[in-house]
Amino acid sequence: MRLKYNIDFVEDKSVKANIKKAISLLEKSFYAHKEVSSFFLNPFEISVLNDIAKVNNIEIVFLSCNDKSERQIFIANPYTDYIEKSSYINVLEFKINNISHPDVLGALLNLGLDRNDIGDIYIGDEKCEFVVLNKDKDFVKFNLTKIKTKKLALILKMIISYLFLKLNI
């Protein structure tokens, strides 16, 4: 049995490529009956994948560091009825003034990260927080030492948060 989906309505080639990549993860989960987590997706991609999962009866959960986050990952066929967010994503924080979103994003991309490995970036008055996949947190923590000419010290912000699910078993 194949997954049922049609993404012909997606016109943007890069968005379509991301959706196809995410669908391959859904298929892996569907056929192997195992938990699979994704990369970060934008709101449109999340909507499309949520619809595909529903049509194909795949248990899917979207995860981010807070309710206001735009970029989220998904977990398909989770093993348990609760999910510890820090097992999948992490928030890194640093104190700095006069820095912009493009500066932070550019510094992360210059480390060799793909845009899909980076979640939301929050710029506050005196601090910046950004979300990365769990697999990248240590690499970023030890290699992102400055942005522009400003040195920084990254702090791993604890996400003490669980997501409790109602599984239809």
Image (spheres, rainbow, N blue to C red):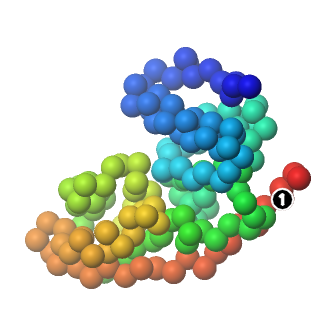
- Residue 123 point in image, percent of width and height: 36, 67
Name the residue located 47 percent from the left edge and 66 percent from the top edge.
Answer: 134
- Report the front residue among 79 and 86: 79
Left/right of residue 123 with respect to residue 19 in the rendered view: left
The answer, for residue 56, to whether it is visible in the render is yes
Asked if residue 112 is positioned above or below residue 144 in the image, the reply reads above
- Report the front residue among 93 and 57: 57
Quarter of image, res 108: bottom left
Name the residue located 75 percent from the left edge and 33 percent from the top edge.
Answer: 56
Left/right of residue 118 with respect to residue 98 in the rendered view: right
Dot 1 falls on a residue whose secondary structure is loop
- Residue 78 point in image, percent of width and height: 70, 57
Indicate the quadrant containing the N terminus: top left, top right, bottom left or bottom right. Answer: top right
Name the residue located 20 percent from the left edge and 75 percent from the top edge.
Answer: 145
Quarter of image, res 124: bottom left
> Which residue sits furthest front?
32
> Which amino acid, by three-letter code, is at mark 1?
Lys
- Report the front residue among 83 and 32: 32
Disc 1 target residue:
166
Asked if residue 59 is positioned above or below residue 19 in the image, the reply reads below
- Report the front residue among 110 and 76: 76
Total numbered labels: 1
Name the residue located 61 percent from the left edge and 41 percent from the top edge.
Answer: 28
> Which residue sits furthest left?
149
The answer, for residue 96, to whether it is visible in the render is no
> Which residue sits furthest right?
169
- Residue 158 point in image, percent of width and height: 51, 80
